Every structure is written in structure tokens, then in C-alpha cells.
Amino acid sequence: MVFSKYSIEMKKIILIVVFLFSSISIWSQRNQIIAYMDMEYILENVPEYLKAQNTLDSKVAKWRKKLDEQARHIEVLKSDLANEKAILTKDLIAEKEEEITVKQIELRRLESLYFGPNGNLFTVRKQLVKPIQDQVYNAVQSIAKRKNYDFVFEKSSDLVMLYSNKKYDISDLVLSTIDRTRLSEQKKEERNKKRTAPKKEATKVQQERIAQKETQKNKKLEAVAKKIADQEAKKKQIAEKRKALMKQREEKRALLRKKKEEATKKKEEEQKAKKDN
């Protein structure tokens, strides 16, 4: 184990030396613009990170509490078995030992679920911290492009910085860039809320004006409706008069036809009487 750690440290030193020689070779060809930042300092001043860290700490505390309770329960089972072992049968002892083994397996499973390589801690941290890391990364990218930096180092990385001039520290610049981005996003969100928000309640004067407009609108609608009703009534009256006139004409025609038929019949009867005489 010690040898393994020593090998890792040696590899890091070799990588640093290679990097330094490479940098010296490059710097000899042209002037390089470099900067560095303190990630720990930046994260401590990002409200979202502090909130995410508090959420994560709360979840970790809850998981550890559950694991501690189960571990204490296992210790109680072990203690009870040790105290009662002398008076228990072999079958009961085996049964209790099996119960303890099952509990221990479950405890290890929960530990792996919560704190394993791909456990809940890893997943939740990734969900909470990644957006903040993206903010920092985007801010660094923006600053590096704007100021033409060739390298931006992270102060707490494995690359040991034996000396660093404060004037090359862009940590505060990264923070201000993140703040501007956050402010821009907040303003955009507020504008969207204003667009989608329900309209504010009208003032008394506005309500009176709205009521007046509604009254005028209703009066106009009533006047139009009355006009249409009068027109329909007039049409109906004209139709009824026409119908009555046609009826009178038909009655007169029927009366004329009847008189004509009676006259014709009377004439025929007179002619017939003359013939008979």
C-alpha cells in the first residue's frame, strides 16, 4: 500500500516535471499569457453552491443516521446472543446468528448504496454541483477568450504552485462573471413572468370606465336587436296584410263564379221552360 502511494506520488512529480519542461520550451518560442483561480474561494462565494452543499449535508446526515441505527441494532443483537447463548439451543443460536448475518449484509448494501462509487452521494453531488461547475467553466472560458489567456490553472490542483502573483488571480473576475450571468438570467426570468403573469386588478376609475364601456356596448347591442326585431315584425305585418288581401280577392272571385253559375243555370232553366210551352 505504501509502495503504491509512493508510485503515485512519483508519477505526479514526473508529470509535473514534464509539464514544466514543455512549458519552458513553449515559452521560449513566444510569450504566454497565463492566469490561475482558486476554485475553493469561488465556490464559497457562489450562493447556489452553498445551498447545494447544505442540501447534500442534510441528505448525508440522514443516511448516516439510518446506518448508525442499523449498526446499533446489530450490536444489540450480538450482545443479546452473547448473554443468552448458554441457555439457547443450537438451532436457536444458528437462527439468531443467521439473523445477524442478514442484518450485516443489509448494512453493507446500504453503505454501498449511499456512499459507494456510484451511490446516492455521487449521484446527488453530481446533480447539485454540476450546474455550478458549468457556471464556473463557462465563466473561465469567456474570460480566457476575452483576455487571450493561454493557460488558466486551478490553485488547489495537483500541480504545486510554489509562488503565485496575485495579479494573475482571476477568481474575483470569475465570480463577477457568474454574478452578471445570474443577474441576466434573473431579469430574463422576471420578464417571462411578467409576460405570463395575470393582469393586475384594475383601479376603481378603470373599473368604472370598463363598466361604462360595457354599458354602452350593451346599449348598442340592444338597439341593434330592437331594430332587427322591428324589421322582423314589419315583415310579418306586411306578409299578414298580403295574405288577407289575397283571401279577400279569392272570396270575391268565388262569389263572382257563384253568381255567374247561378245566372247561367237560371238562363238555361228559362230556355227549357220556353221549349216546354
Image (cartoon, rainbow, N blue to C red):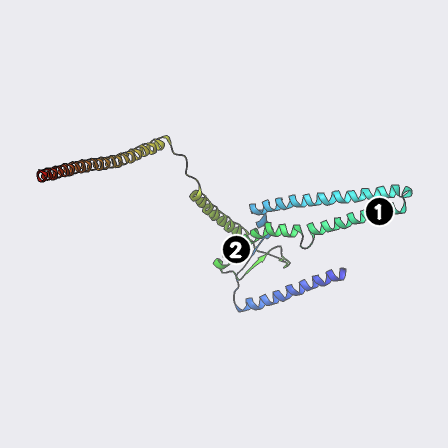
- In the rendered view, would you say 200 is above or below 151? above
Looking at the rendered image, the quarter that the N terminus falls into is bottom right
Q: Residue at x 67, y 62 (%)?
A: 12
| 1 or 2: mark nearer the eye | 1
Q: CA distance from mark 1 to mark 2?
A: 59 Å
Q: Residues within 10 Å of mark 1 (few under 14, many from 20)?
A: few
Q: Is residue 183 among what the camera can see?
A: yes
**Residue extending furthest toward the right:** 86
In the image, 22: left or right of 203? right
Q: Amino acid at mark 2?
A: Asn
User: What residue does disc 2 label?
Assistant: 138
Whole-percent x, y for residue 64 in the image? 71, 45
Residue nearest the observer in this picture, 178 or 36: 178
Q: Residue at x 37, y 30 (%)?
A: 204
Residue nearest the observer in this picture, 100 or 76: 100
In the image, 132: left or right of 200? right
In the image, 224: left or right of 269? right
Instruction: Quadrant for residue 67, please give it.
Output: top right
Local secondary structure at mark 2: helix
- In the rendered view, would you say 207 is above or below 1? above
Instruction: Quadrant for residue 18, please give it.
Output: bottom right
Q: Residues within 10 Å of mark 2 (few under 14, many from 20)?
A: some
Whole-percent x, y for residue 106 in the image? 75, 49
Whole-percent x, y for residue 98 in the image? 82, 49
Whole-percent x, y for residue 75 in the image? 80, 44
Number of marks in the rendered image: 2
Q: Which mark is residue 79?
A: none
Q: Which mark is residue 95?
A: 1
Q: Amino acid at mark 1?
A: Glu
**Residue extending furthest toward the front:** 277
